[in-house]
Image (cartoon, grey):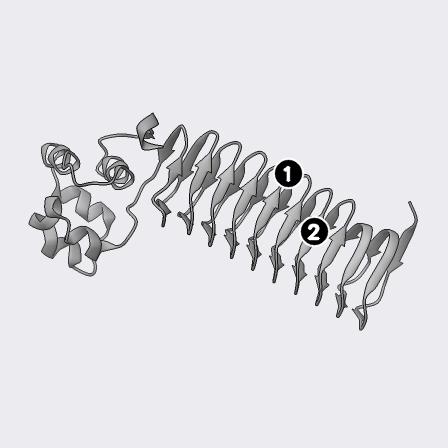
Amino acid sequence: MKTKVIKDTHIKGNLDFDGKIVFKNFCIVDGYIRAQSIESDGSIESGGYIESSGSIKSGRYIESGEYIESDGSIRSGGFIKSGGYIESGEYIESDGSIRSGGFIKSGGYIRSGGSIESGGSIRSGEYIESNGFIESGGYIESSGFIKSGGYIRSGGSIESGGSIRSGEYIFSFTFSIVAKYIITKTLPLGRYFWAEMPPLRKWKKEIQTIGLCWDDYRQMITRAEAEKICSWQGWHWILRAHLEMFLRLKKKYEIKKEEK
Protein backbone atom coordinates (compact mmCIF):
# COMPACT_ATOMS: atom_id res chain seq x y z
CA MET A 1 0.00 0.00 0.00
CA LYS A 2 1.26 3.48 -0.89
CA THR A 3 1.71 5.92 1.99
CA LYS A 4 1.23 9.67 1.94
CA VAL A 5 2.70 11.61 4.88
CA ILE A 6 0.95 14.90 5.66
CA LYS A 7 2.94 17.55 7.55
CA ASP A 8 0.58 20.46 6.83
CA THR A 9 -1.58 21.88 9.61
CA HIS A 10 -4.34 23.12 7.29
CA ILE A 11 -5.63 21.84 3.94
CA LYS A 12 -8.24 24.04 2.24
CA GLY A 13 -9.70 21.47 -0.14
CA ASN A 14 -10.37 17.72 -0.06
CA LEU A 15 -7.80 15.05 0.74
CA ASP A 16 -8.28 11.96 -1.44
CA PHE A 17 -5.57 9.28 -1.73
CA ASP A 18 -5.52 5.68 -2.95
CA GLY A 19 -3.40 4.35 -0.11
CA LYS A 20 -2.53 5.19 3.49
CA ILE A 21 -2.60 8.74 4.85
CA VAL A 22 -0.45 9.52 7.89
CA PHE A 23 -0.81 12.91 9.60
CA LYS A 24 2.36 14.01 11.40
CA ASN A 25 0.88 17.20 12.87
CA PHE A 26 -2.48 18.49 14.02
CA CYS A 27 -4.19 19.16 10.70
CA ILE A 28 -7.59 20.57 9.77
CA VAL A 29 -8.95 19.56 6.36
CA ASP A 30 -11.73 21.87 5.13
CA GLY A 31 -13.15 19.26 2.75
CA TYR A 32 -13.48 15.50 3.01
CA ILE A 33 -10.79 12.90 3.78
CA ARG A 34 -10.84 9.61 1.88
CA ALA A 35 -8.17 6.89 1.81
CA GLN A 36 -7.57 3.16 2.23
CA SER A 37 -6.23 3.84 5.72
CA ILE A 38 -6.08 7.02 7.84
CA GLU A 39 -3.76 7.43 10.80
CA SER A 40 -2.56 10.23 13.06
CA ASP A 41 -0.61 10.55 16.31
CA GLY A 42 -2.59 13.74 16.86
CA SER A 43 -6.11 14.51 15.67
CA ILE A 44 -8.06 13.82 12.48
CA GLU A 45 -10.40 16.71 11.71
CA SER A 46 -12.50 17.27 8.60
CA GLY A 47 -15.14 19.80 7.60
CA GLY A 48 -16.63 17.14 5.33
CA TYR A 49 -16.76 13.37 5.71
CA ILE A 50 -14.02 10.92 6.73
CA GLU A 51 -14.05 7.65 4.81
CA SER A 52 -11.69 4.67 4.76
CA SER A 53 -11.78 1.21 3.18
CA GLY A 54 -9.43 0.15 5.99
CA SER A 55 -9.02 1.57 9.48
CA ILE A 56 -9.17 5.07 10.99
CA LYS A 57 -6.86 5.64 13.95
CA SER A 58 -6.05 8.77 15.93
CA GLY A 59 -3.93 9.38 19.03
CA ARG A 60 -6.06 12.38 20.05
CA TYR A 61 -9.54 12.88 18.56
CA ILE A 62 -11.53 12.30 15.37
CA GLU A 63 -14.01 14.96 14.26
CA SER A 64 -16.07 15.24 11.10
CA GLY A 65 -18.61 17.79 9.91
CA GLU A 66 -20.45 15.08 7.99
CA TYR A 67 -20.12 11.29 8.50
CA ILE A 68 -17.32 8.92 9.55
CA GLU A 69 -17.24 5.54 7.80
CA SER A 70 -14.69 2.73 7.84
CA ASP A 71 -14.76 -0.82 6.50
CA GLY A 72 -12.30 -1.63 9.28
CA SER A 73 -12.00 -0.23 12.78
CA ILE A 74 -12.32 3.30 14.16
CA ARG A 75 -10.04 4.00 17.13
CA SER A 76 -9.40 7.27 18.96
CA GLY A 77 -7.27 8.21 21.96
CA GLY A 78 -9.71 11.06 22.62
CA PHE A 79 -13.28 11.69 21.53
CA ILE A 80 -15.06 10.79 18.28
CA LYS A 81 -17.53 13.38 17.00
CA SER A 82 -19.52 13.40 13.77
CA GLY A 83 -22.17 15.72 12.38
CA GLY A 84 -23.65 12.71 10.58
CA TYR A 85 -23.48 8.97 11.19
CA ILE A 86 -20.56 6.83 12.41
CA GLU A 87 -20.21 3.37 10.87
CA SER A 88 -17.52 0.70 11.21
CA GLY A 89 -17.21 -2.77 9.70
CA GLU A 90 -15.19 -3.91 12.72
CA TYR A 91 -15.24 -2.01 16.04
CA ILE A 92 -15.54 1.57 17.32
CA GLU A 93 -13.39 2.46 20.34
CA SER A 94 -12.67 5.77 22.02
CA ASP A 95 -10.90 6.77 25.22
CA GLY A 96 -13.23 9.78 25.30
CA SER A 97 -16.85 10.23 24.28
CA ILE A 98 -18.55 9.12 21.06
CA ARG A 99 -21.07 11.59 19.67
CA SER A 100 -22.98 11.37 16.41
CA GLY A 101 -25.66 13.50 14.77
CA GLY A 102 -26.92 10.37 13.01
CA PHE A 103 -26.80 6.67 13.78
CA ILE A 104 -23.85 4.72 15.22
CA LYS A 105 -23.33 1.24 13.77
CA SER A 106 -20.54 -1.28 14.29
CA GLY A 107 -19.99 -4.81 13.04
CA GLY A 108 -18.08 -5.44 16.26
CA TYR A 109 -18.18 -3.79 19.66
CA ILE A 110 -18.67 -0.14 20.59
CA ARG A 111 -16.64 0.98 23.59
CA SER A 112 -16.21 4.45 25.05
CA GLY A 113 -14.23 5.88 27.96
CA GLY A 114 -16.86 8.63 28.13
CA SER A 115 -20.48 8.81 27.03
CA ILE A 116 -22.11 7.51 23.82
CA GLU A 117 -24.65 9.85 22.25
CA SER A 118 -26.49 9.38 18.98
CA GLY A 119 -29.13 11.41 17.17
CA GLY A 120 -30.28 8.17 15.56
CA SER A 121 -29.97 4.51 16.51
CA ILE A 122 -27.03 2.66 18.09
CA ARG A 123 -26.33 -0.86 16.84
CA SER A 124 -23.50 -3.27 17.68
CA GLY A 125 -22.66 -6.73 16.37
CA GLU A 126 -20.95 -7.56 19.68
CA TYR A 127 -21.40 -5.41 22.81
CA ILE A 128 -21.81 -1.76 23.85
CA GLU A 129 -19.86 -0.39 26.81
CA SER A 130 -19.60 3.16 28.13
CA ASN A 131 -18.07 4.70 31.25
CA GLY A 132 -20.56 7.56 30.93
CA PHE A 133 -24.19 7.58 29.79
CA ILE A 134 -25.67 6.05 26.63
CA GLU A 135 -28.35 8.08 24.88
CA SER A 136 -30.00 7.51 21.53
CA GLY A 137 -32.71 9.27 19.55
CA GLY A 138 -33.65 5.89 18.03
CA TYR A 139 -33.30 2.31 19.17
CA ILE A 140 -30.31 0.71 20.90
CA GLU A 141 -29.46 -2.83 19.83
CA SER A 142 -26.60 -5.16 20.72
CA SER A 143 -25.94 -8.84 20.08
CA GLY A 144 -24.11 -8.98 23.41
CA PHE A 145 -24.36 -7.02 26.63
CA ILE A 146 -24.97 -3.30 27.11
CA LYS A 147 -23.16 -1.66 30.02
CA SER A 148 -23.08 1.96 31.13
CA GLY A 149 -21.58 3.85 34.05
CA GLY A 150 -24.43 6.36 33.78
CA TYR A 151 -27.99 6.15 32.52
CA ILE A 152 -29.18 4.40 29.36
CA ARG A 153 -31.95 6.27 27.57
CA SER A 154 -33.47 5.55 24.17
CA GLY A 155 -36.10 7.16 21.98
CA GLY A 156 -36.93 3.66 20.72
CA SER A 157 -36.48 0.14 21.99
CA ILE A 158 -33.44 -1.21 23.87
CA GLU A 159 -32.50 -4.78 22.94
CA SER A 160 -29.60 -6.91 24.16
CA GLY A 161 -28.68 -10.52 23.50
CA GLY A 162 -27.25 -10.56 27.03
CA SER A 163 -27.67 -8.28 30.02
CA ILE A 164 -28.22 -4.52 30.32
CA ARG A 165 -26.41 -2.87 33.24
CA SER A 166 -26.62 0.77 34.20
CA GLY A 167 -24.96 2.83 36.93
CA GLU A 168 -28.19 4.83 37.03
CA TYR A 169 -31.41 3.91 35.19
CA ILE A 170 -32.54 2.30 31.92
CA PHE A 171 -35.40 3.92 30.06
CA SER A 172 -37.06 3.41 26.69
CA PHE A 173 -39.60 6.02 25.57
CA THR A 174 -41.47 3.22 23.77
CA PHE A 175 -41.37 1.11 26.98
CA SER A 176 -39.66 -1.70 25.10
CA ILE A 177 -36.66 -3.41 26.75
CA VAL A 178 -35.43 -6.87 25.75
CA ALA A 179 -32.61 -8.63 27.61
CA LYS A 180 -31.89 -11.64 29.82
CA TYR A 181 -31.79 -9.34 32.84
CA ILE A 182 -31.27 -5.71 33.80
CA ILE A 183 -29.40 -4.01 36.64
CA THR A 184 -30.14 -0.42 37.71
CA LYS A 185 -29.42 1.79 40.74
CA THR A 186 -31.69 4.85 40.44
CA LEU A 187 -35.13 5.71 39.07
CA PRO A 188 -36.06 7.34 35.73
CA LEU A 189 -38.59 10.14 35.12
CA GLY A 190 -37.85 12.41 38.11
CA ARG A 191 -39.17 12.92 41.64
CA TYR A 192 -42.46 14.61 40.70
CA PHE A 193 -43.58 11.62 38.64
CA TRP A 194 -42.95 9.18 41.49
CA ALA A 195 -44.55 11.46 44.08
CA GLU A 196 -47.86 11.26 42.20
CA MET A 197 -47.93 7.46 42.00
CA PRO A 198 -50.64 6.03 44.32
CA PRO A 199 -48.35 3.64 46.27
CA LEU A 200 -45.92 6.49 47.02
CA ARG A 201 -48.29 9.34 47.91
CA LYS A 202 -47.68 8.71 51.61
CA TRP A 203 -44.15 10.12 51.04
CA LYS A 204 -45.19 12.78 48.46
CA LYS A 205 -43.95 15.75 50.50
CA GLU A 206 -40.58 14.11 51.23
CA ILE A 207 -40.09 12.99 47.62
CA GLN A 208 -40.74 16.53 46.34
CA THR A 209 -38.40 18.12 48.86
CA ILE A 210 -35.40 19.61 47.07
CA GLY A 211 -32.20 18.63 48.83
CA LEU A 212 -33.16 15.05 49.64
CA CYS A 213 -31.33 12.45 47.53
CA TRP A 214 -32.03 8.85 46.46
CA ASP A 215 -30.44 7.39 49.60
CA ASP A 216 -32.73 9.54 51.78
CA TYR A 217 -35.78 8.06 50.09
CA ARG A 218 -34.56 4.54 50.70
CA GLN A 219 -34.19 5.26 54.43
CA MET A 220 -37.84 6.38 54.69
CA ILE A 221 -39.29 3.09 53.47
CA THR A 222 -39.19 -0.21 55.38
CA ARG A 223 -38.80 -3.52 53.57
CA ALA A 224 -42.47 -4.40 54.27
CA GLU A 225 -43.54 -1.04 52.79
CA ALA A 226 -41.23 -1.57 49.81
CA GLU A 227 -42.80 -4.95 49.09
CA LYS A 228 -46.29 -3.42 49.29
CA ILE A 229 -45.29 -0.57 46.95
CA CYS A 230 -43.89 -2.97 44.35
CA SER A 231 -46.91 -5.28 44.54
CA TRP A 232 -49.21 -2.58 43.14
CA GLN A 233 -50.75 -3.87 39.90
CA GLY A 234 -50.65 -0.48 38.19
CA TRP A 235 -46.91 -0.51 37.57
CA HIS A 236 -45.49 -1.18 34.11
CA TRP A 237 -42.94 -3.95 34.59
CA ILE A 238 -40.04 -1.62 33.67
CA LEU A 239 -40.98 0.79 36.47
CA ARG A 240 -41.57 -2.07 38.93
CA ALA A 241 -38.16 -3.53 38.08
CA HIS A 242 -36.47 -0.21 38.80
CA LEU A 243 -38.30 0.11 42.09
CA GLU A 244 -37.42 -3.41 43.22
CA MET A 245 -33.73 -2.75 42.65
CA PHE A 246 -33.83 0.80 43.99
CA LEU A 247 -35.54 -0.36 47.20
CA ARG A 248 -33.03 -3.24 47.41
CA LEU A 249 -35.55 -6.03 47.10
CA LYS A 250 -33.56 -7.43 44.17
CA LYS A 251 -29.97 -7.05 42.89
CA LYS A 252 -31.06 -7.69 39.31
CA TYR A 253 -34.33 -8.14 37.45
CA GLU A 254 -34.74 -11.15 35.20
CA ILE A 255 -37.12 -10.33 32.37
CA LYS A 256 -39.96 -12.81 31.86
CA LYS A 257 -40.92 -13.96 28.37
CA GLU A 258 -44.29 -12.21 28.54
CA GLU A 259 -42.54 -8.93 29.39
CA LYS A 260 -40.27 -8.93 26.32
Q: Going 17% across and 36% down the picture, which residue do you hit?
A: 230
- Disc number placed over residue 107 in the picture, else none: 1
Element under label 1?
Answer: loop
The image shows residue 187 at horizontal and vertical percentages of 28, 46
Residue denoted by label 2: 69
Report, in whole angstroms, how far the alpha carbon at label 1 lies from the one at label 2.
12 Å
Element under label 2?
Answer: strand
The image shows residue 112 at horizontal and vertical percentages of 56, 46
Q: Going 11% across and 47% down the picture, which residue do you hit?
A: 198
From the viewer's side, name the closer residue of 87 and 128. 87
Q: Quadrant of residue 7?
A: bottom right
The residue type indicated by label 1 comes to Gly
The residue type indicated by label 2 comes to Glu
* Sequence-earlier tag: 1 or 2: 2
The image shows residue 55 at horizontal and vertical percentages of 75, 45
Q: Going 84% across and 67% down the picture, which residue do you hit?
A: 8
Residue 8 located left or right of residue 156: right
Q: Going 12% across and 47% down the picture, which residue do you hit?
A: 200
How many marks are shown on the rendered structure?
A: 2
- Quarter placement of the C terminus: top left
Residue 183 located left or right of residue 32: left
Q: Quadrant of residue 212?
A: bottom left
